[in-house]
Amino acid sequence: MPSLKELSKEKESLSGGHRLCAGCGASIVARQVLLTAPKPLVVTCATGCLEVATTIFPYTAWEMPWMHSAFENAAATCSGIESAYQSLKKQGTLPVDANINFITFGGDGGTYDIGLQSLSGAMERGHKMLYVCYNNQAYMNTGIQRSSATPKGGFTTTSPVGKVKPGKEQSRKDLTEIMVAHNIPYVAQAVVGDWRDLTTKVQKALSKDGPSFINVLTPCRLGWGCAPEKTLDIGRLAADTCFWPLYEVEEGVYKLTHKPKEKKPIIKLLKLQDRFKHLFKKGNEALLAEIQEDIDKKWKKLLFLCGEKSE
Amino acid sequence: MSDEKKGWKELPIGAILEAGTAKNYKTGDWRHIRPIWNKEKCIQCLRCWIYCPDSSIIIKDGKVDGIDLDHCKGCGICAAECPVKPVKAITMVSEKEIK
Ligand SMILES: Cc1ncc(C[n+]2csc(CCOP(=O)(O)OP(=O)(O)O)c2C)c(N)n1
Ligand code: SF4
Ligand code: SF4
């Protein structure tokens, strides 16, 4: 586990002057991942707020070699670069001890939906790379459209709220578990408000001789309708309500990395976000109860997988 | 337009070749509230620094040394995270008040 004192001696990895909204969680995640990762680094990024806002021509906020090619192929781009690197080492063009780390960032749209095949391929082929999904649970850069990561009952412009519909009707996809099913050395869930947990996971992920994946829940003030200074509190509350449990699967072994002292009711988290405002209106009581039930069920299953006692 | 298509070797390089140039772009004027850092109260826990989304907490020799107002957008995260009690070492003040 790195200390803040140590991390603060690292060269800044993401410069100020990018155009993400004030209080956006995406750059907090990216900065913490980049500061922790052993250098040198090569980074690729899927289309999305993090990419668009950090690389408005002729500016870039990234302090390392960085590449964006398209929305759907960030993992393929990274795996291609990693393959070229392995080949150059074999050919003797690069020294055998050139320890370059490869990282890809993608939003949930770019990871859960549109880039899923390229991510799956890269993980299955076994490239030594870390894929970080900064998951704000919708396509934010194009104005808040639903993705398969959007939770049930959440408002987006394509899962609207009105007389007929109460926001998104389907449950969110469990991508973390899909990644576990790829049998890669390291998979984890993290959140933007716990730097210690996230940076420890990044260190573990990059110490593996193969692919790794971290799914980081990241509030978006615009899409979630929340105050910018609440970004981290909302993240931590997501962990404490078990809406977003913090856990890891290392070489197939499940482990909880944060066990809430007291599991908080989901309404505490929902109340801080405008995207769930309608759930507190008359007529949506059943849906609210269903959301809590879904969370309880999944939490119970996770406790079992982690070898923890059921509550 | 010329009929002759350029080969990949003749195409101009489509990249920004210098890293971290965004720092030449100022986002400080987005701010409507400003973080004021009190050096005497600060316990150097570095929480503000690790959580600032705009890399705007200035660090010198492993210690907080001020705030980069050219880039700080005034999100208030640093003040929210500061653990010093009862008065925090970073407080947010309206830009209007400062002017
Ligand atoms: C193939 C393709 N389809 C659509 C777009 C338009 N587009 C650009 S950014 C974006 C949203 C990205 O959403 P997400 O991956 O969740 O990241 P976020 O913006 O939320 O950070 C979309 C749909 C595109 N650039 N390329
Ligand atoms: S729209 Fe959301 S994800 Fe995009 S920059 Fe703003 S806060 Fe960040
Ligand atoms: S107000 Fe926000 S952007 Fe400004 S220094 Fe504090 S955390 Fe950084």
Image (cartoon, coloured by chain):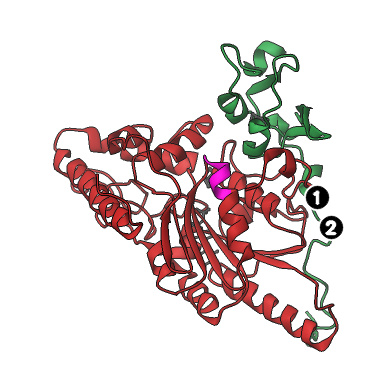
Chain colours: A red, B green
Main SS, magenta region, reads helix
- Answer with the quadrant where ligand 2 appears in the image: top right
Q: Amino acid at mark 1?
A: Thr
Report x, y in % for residue B98.
Answer: 71, 13
Report x, y in % for residue A225.
Answer: 42, 37
Quarter of the figure with the C terminus of chain A = top left
Q: What residue is at 62 percent from the left and 28 percent from the top?
A: B78
Q: Within the image, what quadrant is residue A7 found in?
A: top right
* A148 relative to B8 in the view: left or right: left
Task: Output the chain of dot 1.
Answer: B
Relative to A49, say whether A237 is above or below.
Answer: above
Residue under label 2, please give it: B18
Relative to A294, say whether B54 is above or below.
Answer: above
Q: Is residue A78 visible?
A: yes
Report x, y in % for residue B53.
Answer: 63, 40
Circle 2 crowding by C-alpha within 10 Å: few under 14, some 14–19, many from 20: few
Magenta stretch contains residue A113: no
CB atoms of marks 2 and 1 within 8 Å: yes
Element carrying mark 2 = loop
Report x, y in % for residue A209.
Answer: 62, 72
Q: Is residue A104 visible?
A: no
Q: Amino acid at mark 2?
A: Glu
Residue under label 1, please give it: B21
Question: Which residues make up the magenta segment?
Answer: A193-198
Relative to A44, say whether B74 is above or below.
Answer: above
Circle 1 crowding by C-alpha within 10 Å: few under 14, some 14–19, many from 20: many
